[in-house]
Structures are given as structure tokens and as C-alpha cells.
Amino acid sequence: MKLAESELIFNESGRIYHLNVSGEDIADIVILVGDPNRVDKFVKHFDKIEVERRKREFRTVTGTIGSKRITVIGTGIGTDNIDIVMNELDIAVNYDRETQTWKENRRRLTVIRAGTTGALQNEIRAGDLVVSSWAAGFDNLASYYEWDPDSEERAVRTAFISFAPHVPTPYFIKANQGLVEKFKNDNVFVGITATAPGFYGPQGRQAFAKIRYSLLPEVLHKFEYNGLRFTNFEMETSALLLLAQLMGWQATTVCVALAGRLAGTFTKDYSATIEKLVRYTIEVAIRL
């Protein structure tokens, strides 16, 4: 399938437009962080830096820890940015500009989002790690792709509609379960990550503008299906899992809890909390 110049935009250096990267810049293991400044917290653990690129809010650094090559990308916030990042990574590593066709032998990346989150269960405390085995997308990104949920994904959605018909209906999507297993241990919580298209109203936060679903965190807190529960609220994971599934890639999210949404609490030691996330993500990544 040849794509028009208006569909795939490259800069004068031949790199894909927003990320400003080419295929050789990208390692097979990619860590995504929302805050571009958080890239440095990972890079300080690198033994060697090979590539540094930046454009707008997108910042990419590739390097090595021992013999393991890893790319870290600062994506900015939201499912719209994840849509750009995932598609442009795929173009960078799997599209041949000379023939204007997709490569037959696709590179299949492993993508890990390392983020911060608000906990939806009281046992998840500030500083605890949460891994997404599922996501519930309250965004509308899935509406724009030809994605067919499997029977389990449809069943969870049906159960949620029955449980909470008075709130917006998300799509439910599984993470790569083999990758999730790599992150599991006795000190990590695993469950459904709710992905919202905003920080305030869509997550039930009341500022000045009146909101419709102020009790959404409590609703999610109570939902359970075959042992699955909502663990946390954030703004990127559903898009990550959707696009990874469509591309045949492995993906999941590991977050550190900064806030307890039910208890109304927030961490008192932000720097140490973030460092815990960074170290654990790297620890797992270098074992992959």
C-alpha cells in the first residue's frame, strides 16, 4: 500500500515528522514517559547514549545499559499523542520510503509506558506500582480504527454496561499478558487501568466548571468481573494497547501511584516515588 506525501510526512533529514526519528534510531524495547523531562531520569542509568532527537514535546533518546539497547521517548500527555507516537514509530521502523511500501518482515517492538497514576483501590498506596493487564478506554480512539475486540474483551464491556449504565461506556482491551507477567511480583498491583481523555472532568475532578460524573471513581472502584478490578486512572494506556494490538507488538503500562482517588491523598515524596518507577521499569526491561 503506497501512501501519499500528505499521509506520511517526513522532514528534510528524511525522518518522520513529529518524532524526528528514523528506524535505526529506535531500539526494539521502547519506554514511553509522559513528561519529556522524565527522559533524563532513565537516561542517567544508561552506560552509553547513541541517539538524541527532539521536536515539540517529543523527545527521544536511545542508548544501552550493558548490552541491552533501549529507547526512551517523552510523549507528552494524552491518547492523541500516543496515537502520533505509536504510528510514527511503526512508520519509522517498518515503512520503506524508497519503495513507498510497508516492509514484509516487520519489526515488532516491545513498548512499555512508565507513568504516574491515581489509585482506585484503597489498598494501593502512594509509591505503589501498578501494572495494566487491561485498559478501559473512555477516549474515542478505537472508533477510528478497524479493531475487533475478542470475546473476553466484549464480555467485560457488556458486564460494565450492565453494572454502570449511567456513566460513559469505555472499550476494554487486554495488554500483552506475557509482558505483564514479566512485571508481576508480590509488591505490584495488577488490574484494569481506566484511561480518560482529560485530567479534570473525565476523571471526576470538580474544579470550577460543573461536571456530570463526579462519582465515576467510586463506580470504577466497585466494579469487578471474574476477579478483574479497576486499579487506577490515567490518560494514555488504552491507546497504547489498542495500537500495539493492531501492530502486533507487545505493550503494557507500569505506573507509580501518586494519588489515592478514594482517600483524596497525594504523595509527600514525589522524587523518590518517581525514582522507584524508573528503577523497576529498567530492571524489567533489561531482562526482556
Image (cartoon, rainbow, N blue to C red):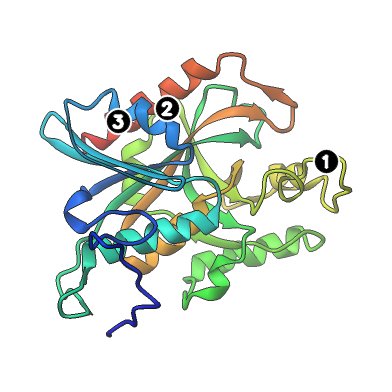
* Secondary structure category for the residue under label 1: loop
Residue 40: x percent and y percent? Answer: 36, 28
Residue at 58 percent across and 56 percent down: it is: 136
Residue 258: x percent and y percent? Answer: 59, 27
- Which comes before the other along the chain, label 1 or label 2? 1
Q: Is residue 266 left or right of residue 227?
A: right
The numbered dot on residue 277 is: 2
Residue 75 to residue 269: above or below: below
Q: Quadrant of residue 96?
A: bottom left
The numbered dot on residue 34 is: none
* Secondary structure category for the residue under label 2: helix
Residue that numbered label 3 is attached to: 282
- Within 10 Å of disc 3 (Cα), the crowding (few <14, some 14-19, many 20+) is some
* Secondary structure category for the residue under label 3: helix
User: In this view of the protein, can residue 92 be seen by the observer?
Assistant: yes
Q: Is residue 119 left or right of residue 181?
A: right
Residue lying at the far left of the rendered structure: 67
Q: How many marks?
A: 3
Amino acid carrying label 1: it is Gln
Q: Quadrant of residue 288?
A: top left
Q: Is residue 277 left or right of residue 224?
A: left
Spatial CA distance of label 1 from label 2 is 28 Å
Residue at 44 percent across and 31 percent down: it is: 37
Amino acid carrying label 2: it is Leu
Spatial CA distance of label 1 from label 3 is 36 Å
Residue 64: x percent and y percent? Answer: 17, 34
Residue 144 to residue 178: above or below: below
User: In this view of the protein, can residue 186 be seen by the observer?
Assistant: no
Residue that numbered label 1 is attached to: 206
Spatial CA distance of label 2 from label 3 is 9 Å
